[in-house]
Amino acid sequence: MKECIIKSPLGFTKIIGDEEGIASVIVFNSEEKITYIIPVELEDCVIQLNEYFEGKRTQFDLNLNPEGTNFQKQVWKQLEQIPYGKTMSYLDLSKQLGDVKAIRAVANANGKNPLWIIVPCHRVIGSDGSLTGYAGGLHRKQWLLEHENPYKQQSLF
C-alpha cells in the first residue's frame, strides 16, 4: 500500500491505496508531515479532493477498495448514493437498506467508514435534523455540509 499526507482546509489528510483502489482517507487532529512526491496510485485522489475543496467537484470518480465486512460495504455503497448538497437520516438509510430495525448497525457501519468525504458519511444526520456523531468531529461535519450547501449564507454587513 502506498500513502501520502496532504493539507486540506479541515486538516492534514492521509490517503492510503494501491493499484486496486483507495483503501482509506482519514483526517488528523494534529499536524503531520506533508508528502511532496505523491505516489502515482494516489494522484487522482489528491487531485479530486483538491477539486472538491475548491468547489469544482461534486462527485468522486475513483476506484475504491476499503476493508470492511459485507454489511459495512453495503452501507458505504448506499452512502455514495446520497447526492451532493443533500442529507439523509440514519432511519431513512436503514429503510433504504431494507431493515428499519438495523438503524444502530447502520450507524455503526457509517462511523467506521474509512473513506472520509469520498464516501459521504457526513451527509447522514439525525431524524430531527441534528448533527449526530462524526468520526472527524462535528465541526468538520458542519463545515462539509455548509461547503456543499447550494445556498451559501451571505453576510448582511
Image (spheres, rainbow, N blue to C red):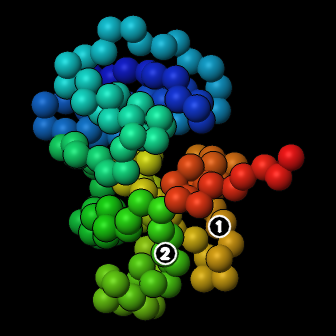
Query: Which mark, residue 109?
Result: none
Asked if 102 appears above or below 29 in the picture, the reply is below
Q: Secondary structure at mark 2?
A: strand
Q: Is residue 87 above or below residue 128?
A: above
Q: Residue furthest left?
A: 19
Where does residue 11 sit, x and y in percent of width and height?
59, 30
Residue under the point 29% across and 47% down: 60
Residue 128 against residue 150 in the figure, above or below: below
**Is residue 3 visible in the rendered structure shown here?**
yes
Q: Position of residue 21 (x, y in %)?
A: 19, 39
Q: How many marks?
A: 2
Task: Write the residue at 13% across / 31% down.
Answer: 19
Determine crowd level at label 1: few under 14, some 14-19, many 20+ residues with C-alpha closer than 10 A.
some
Left or right of 45: which side holds 128?
A: right
In the picture, the disc for residue 132 is 1
In the rendered image of this protein, does residue 11 appear above or below residue 103? above
**Pick the front one: 155 or 75:** 155
Residue at image coords 32%, 51%:
59
Assign a secondary structure to mark 1. Answer: loop
Residue of label 2: 88
State the CA–CA distance, disc 1 to disc 2.
12 Å
Residue 139 image offset from top left, x and y in percent: 69, 49
Res 40 → quadrant: top left
The amino acid pointed to by label 1 is Thr
Circle 2 crowding by C-alpha within 10 Å: few under 14, some 14–19, many from 20: some
- x 44%, y 21%: residue: 5
Disc nearest the viewer among 1 and 2: 2
Mark 1 or mark 2: name the one nearer the start of the chain: 2
- Residue 97 located left or right of residue 156: left
- Looking at the rendered structure, the kind of residue marked 2 is Met
